[in-house]
């Protein structure tokens, strides 16, 4: 006998349902991007757990809502969207090539579950948690939200006694981590399944299909990408598409990193990331834990959060793009590099006065052209694959597929000019040229003049309205 669902009994997982029966035993919800999304009974068992519901408290774009007020959507709705697109992709392949590729119910179910659970191990504040925060507080730790997703899935299955066989569970976890180097693929006769949720060959998958449209819409940005047309062009095991890059506002992000890092000793984050039973309780509400705590050890963190609320942010000084010829041997720029290049005519700089953000932007495959790993067919009747040769690509398209942008911020408004000049000196010493993108804003230079004339340090809270536009300037580019 099977379990109960809406007062009716549905068969066990091993029972094959017709398409009519499948719709009868599903639950639908409305999504503002994809319309009606239908959840099958097994997927619903995962959704109706406190571990999956935790994703409601994880903002998809981390701190971007500080710049784009509408960017408050969560990992919860994104995960449902990826589930639906994974379902659409595998069903289209099954309808057109099901016999040829031997796609069965086992395949469709595991692909859908992988899409649903691919982000269940995500930490707070989008990718900042694993890329910026953890490396600072747990030196040498290699941690990724994909790996935590695998641990969380095992924990959820055990904690809630979810009836999923071991072979399906193994396949789901492999599909989630397929983009990782060295990820195992035991189902070698159906390698195309690994390209749907986490495409390790070219980075083009339904995960991106969802966040491209969802994130652009939430931020009020234009988006010409139509994932529906991509589905129509899926043939055999090749997926095509485009890519977009987004991320939080850099100055706010750097302050959040500092705030949470300073709170580390009190909150014992390391105990959360090692144990799934504790980790699922960790989400964006940790900021409120810091903000409302009366613990004296968290005072410095609370002050930083208060500055974020008041828009008293780290001041942008300048940025430069690393020359293409230096990308291969590029070494991350640190505050110490800037301090060592300071000009003696300015106030003495210290490492704690400076924040540096090294931002890599690429088209999914580092310095390699992503088109090289995408195969095409002349038409639906053709079985011969080919890649796009360089001589067939428009010369108007970029010839470089990766940029490294270094942005430097002053933590105190009156040091903007000193930090900016030290940054220029660093560029001249390291690269023999200055590749500044923006001049230091005149308003920020006037802060320096006011400081020099009065001798007052106006960097403390509430003494001065800090210049920070609601809409980010060009130098506040986005990445993911």
Image (spheres, grey):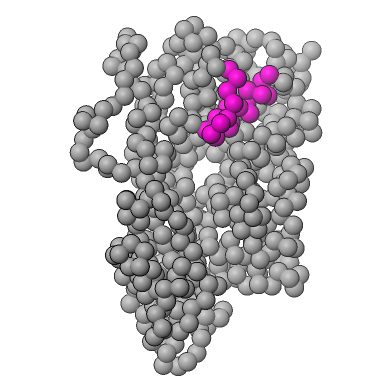
Left or right: where 188 falls relative to 398: right
Height in image: 444 above or below 288?
below
Percent x, y of residue 202:
43, 32
- Give the quadrant of residue 231: top left
- In the figure, 318 relative to 133: above or below? below
- Res 28 seen here: no
Magenta residues span 167-187
Drawn side of residue 280 relative to residue 328, left or right: right
Residue 290 place in picture, x, y as percent:
69, 64
Q: Is residue 101 above or below residue 246?
A: above
State the residue in front, 53 or 477. 477
At 79% from the left and 27% from the top, the residue drawn is 161
- Residue located at (33% from left, 13% from top): 384
Q: Position of residue 322 (x, y in %)?
A: 35, 56
- Image point (57%, 30%), residue name: 183
Q: Is residue 293 magenta?
A: no
| Residue 23: quarter of image | top right
- Quarter where residue 147 is shown: top right
What residue appears at the point 75 percent right and 73 percent down from the top-left corner? 296
């Amino acid at each position: 006998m099977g379990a109960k669902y809406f007062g009716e009994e549905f068969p066990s997982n091993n029972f094959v349902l017709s398409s009519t029966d499948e719709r009868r035993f599903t639950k639908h919800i409305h999504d503002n991007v994809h319309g009606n999304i239908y959840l099958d009974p097994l997927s619903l068992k995962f959704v109706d757990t406190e571990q999956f519901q935790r994703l409601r408290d994880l903002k998809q774009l981390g701190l971007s809502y500080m710049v784009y007020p509408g960017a408050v959507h969560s990992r919860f709705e994104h995960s449902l969207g990826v589930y639906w697109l994974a379902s659409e992709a595998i069903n289209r392949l099954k309808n057109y090539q099901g016999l040829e590729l031997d796609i069965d119910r086992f395949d469709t179910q595991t692909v859908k579950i992988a899409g649903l659970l691919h982000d269940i191990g995500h930490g707070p504040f989008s990718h900042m948690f694993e890329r910026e925060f953890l490396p600072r507080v747990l030196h040498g730790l290699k941690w990724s939200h994909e790996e935590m997703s695998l641990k969380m899935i095992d924990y959820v299955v055990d904690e809630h006694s979810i009836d999923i066989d071991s072979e399906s569970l193994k396949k789901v976890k492999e599909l989630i981590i397929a983009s990782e180097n060295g990820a195992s693929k035991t189902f070698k006769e159906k390698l195309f399944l690994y390209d749907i949720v986490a495409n390790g060959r070219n980075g083009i998958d339904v995960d991106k299909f969802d966040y491209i449209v969802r994130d652009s819409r939430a931020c009020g940005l234009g988006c010409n990408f139509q994932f529906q047309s991509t589905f129509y062009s899926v043939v055999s095991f090749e997926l095509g598409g485009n890519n977009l890059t987004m991320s939080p506002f850099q100055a706010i992000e750097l302050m959040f990193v500092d705030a949470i890092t300073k709170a580390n000793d009190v909150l014992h984050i390391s105990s959360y990331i090692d144990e799934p039973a504790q980790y699922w309780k960790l989400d964006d509400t940790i900021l409120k834990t810091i903000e409302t705590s009366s613990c004296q050890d968290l005072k410095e963190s609370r002050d930083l959060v208060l500055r974020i609320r008041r828009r008293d942010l780290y001041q942008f000084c300048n940025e430069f793009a690393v020359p293409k010829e230096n990308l291969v041997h590029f070494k991350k720029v640190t505050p110490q590099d800037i301090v060592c290049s300071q000009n003696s005519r300015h106030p003495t700089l210290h490492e704690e006065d400076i924040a540096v953000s090294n931002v890599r932007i690429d088209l999914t495959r580092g310095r390699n052209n992503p088109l090289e790993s995408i195969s095409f067919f002349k038409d639906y009747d053709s079985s011969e694959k080919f890649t796009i040769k360089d001589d067939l690509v428009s010369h108007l398209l970029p010839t470089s597929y990766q940029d490294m942008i270094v942005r430097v911020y002053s933590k105190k408004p009156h040091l903007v000019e000193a930090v900016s000049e030290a940054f220029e000196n660093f560029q001249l010493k390291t690269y023999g040229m200055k590749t500044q993108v923006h001049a230091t804003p005149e308003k920020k230079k006037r802060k320096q003049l006011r400081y020099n004339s009065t001798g007052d340090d106006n960097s403390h809270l509430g003494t001065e309205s800090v210049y920070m536009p609601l809409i980010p300037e060009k130098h506040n580019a986005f990445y993911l």
